Image (cartoon, grey):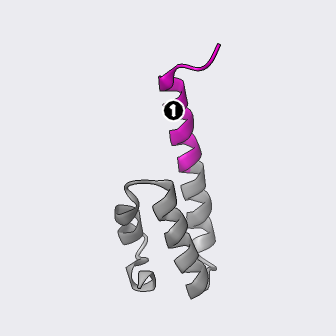
Amino acid sequence: MGCSERQKEIRRRRKRRLQLAHLKGRLAKATPSEKLEIVRKLRAITPGSEVIIENWKLIASDR
């Protein structure tokens, strides 16, 4: 028997949180080209990516 939709949602949210923590950790030593890649990945991961990009001050490296 499969998981309930609620359990799937919780699993997706936890995985997304881990991915965001990993990307934020890499951000400190990232070169400008790596920062662009992080921005691209953020946009693919979450619908609220623009808020995260603004909070992490990646707007300058975005363009």
Which residue matches tag 1? Answer: 10
- Magenta region: which residues? 1-17
Q: Residue 7 lies in magenta, yes or no?
A: yes
In the image, farthest residue toward the front:
1
Q: Which residue is drawn at 39% across and 54% down?
A: 47
Count how many numbered circles sit on residues in the image.
1
Left or right? Give the position of 23 relative to 56.
right
Q: Where in the figure is residue 26, as x and y percent of width and height?
A: 63, 70
Answer above or below: position of 14 versus 32. above
61 to 12, vertically: above or below: below
Inspect the magenta stretch and tell me whether residue 16 lies in it.
yes
Instruction: Identify the residue at horizontal 50%, vertical 59% (top origin).
Output: 44
Decide whether the magenta segment is chiefly helix, strand or loop: helix
Q: Which residue is drawn at 37% across and 56% down?
A: 48
Q: Position of residue 49 (x, y in %)?
A: 41, 61
Q: Quadrant of the C terminus?
A: bottom left
Residue 50 lies, with reference to residue 9, above or below; the image says below
Quick one: quadrant of the N terminus?
top right
Q: What residue type is labelled 1?
A: Ile
What x and y, as percent, mark residue 10? 51, 32
| Mark 1 element type | helix
